[in-house]
Amino acid sequence: MSAPTTPLPGALAGLAPLLDHYGYLAVALLVLLDNCAVPVPGQTVLVLASVYAGTGHLSFPAVLLIAVCAATLGNSLGYLVGRTGGRAFVHRWGRYVLLTPARMERADGFFERHGGKVVAVARFVDVLRQTNGVIAGTTGMPWRRFLPFNVLGAVLWTGVWGTFGYLAGANIGGMYRTAIRYQVWFAIGLGVLVAAFLLRQVLRYRRRRREDTGTGPAPDDGSSSDGPWP
């Protein structure tokens, strides 16, 4: 297999020899690892393989099917790691990364309410794509709930980036740089929303603690022990 004659941007050009030599196997392996807590360029190889498909060097349906299966399997392996060893890791080492039992309990509650949405969209955000399966397993998200959202996320992620690469064609260089720039802004926006949510949770927690310990402001009942009766 030979690379398309279209000039490729740096990240894609660096993976071209790997895809030239191993084809679909490279797609399967890198996408699987990228969805299983291993920082490899799985998303980049998916885009590149789709560009190859657009120029007739690979089958586009085969690229999509392989990527969906690899992404689903990778996230499932991450879930298994979190389910079998995540709790033990948190109990032993969590305090060193500020992951206390109380914070873990709040994470459990958050994933119980919003875990499906997180699993479905996490693949579009670097770091979350690699770790959301592990987090879901560690927080005890039921497998029967995790699996459909895992498959949905794999289909959406593969469909978006695969179609992007397939349609980009000769314009892949400029379009890829634009897409990466918008992805960075998306990640920043998501980070701001998460930070705001966490701040809100912290403020609510502190307010409840003050109310429980009676250190908050006393209610105004119209009387005062320091002054005369009206």
Image (cartoon, grey):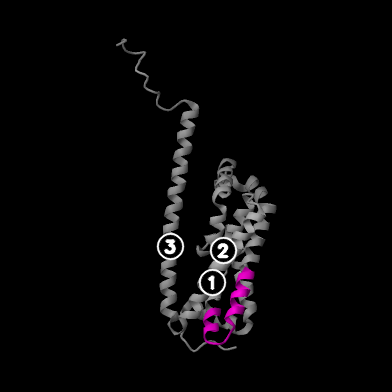
Q: Which quarter shows the C terminus?
A: top left
Residue 199, above or below 70: above
Kindly identify which residue carries mark 1: 159
Please report the residue visible at 55 percent of the width from the left and 71 percent of the height from the top. 158
Camera sees residue 132: yes
Kindly identify which residue carries mark 2: 153
Q: Quadrant of residue 123?
A: bottom right
Residue 79, above or below 156: above
Using the numbered discs, state the Cα–Cα distance from disc 1 to disc 2 in whole angstroms: 10 Å
Using the numbered discs, state the Cα–Cα distance from disc 2 to disc 3 in whole angstroms: 17 Å
Q: Earlier in the sequence, mark 2 or mark 3?
A: 2
View extreme (left): residue: 230
- Residue 47, position as x, y percentages in the image: 52, 76
- Residue 133, position as x, y percentages in the image: 61, 58
Instruction: Give the magenta range.
Output: 49-70
Number of marks:
3
Query: Residue type at mark 2?
Result: Gly
Please report the residue visible at 42 percent of the width from the left and 49 percent of the height from the top. 196
Q: Which quarter shows the N terminus?
A: bottom right
Q: Is residue 55 magenta?
A: yes
Please report the residue visible at 42 percent of the width from the left and 28 percent of the height from the top. 216
Q: Earlier in the sequence, mark 3 or mark 1?
A: 1
- Residue 95, position as x, y percentages in the image: 58, 44
Query: Residue type at mark 3?
Result: Phe
Camera sees residue 41: no
Q: Is residue 141 magenta?
A: no
Secondary element type, mark 1: helix
Using the numbered discs, state the Cα–Cα distance from disc 3 to disc 1 in whole angstroms: 18 Å
Secondary element type, mark 2: helix
Kindly identify which residue carries mark 3: 186
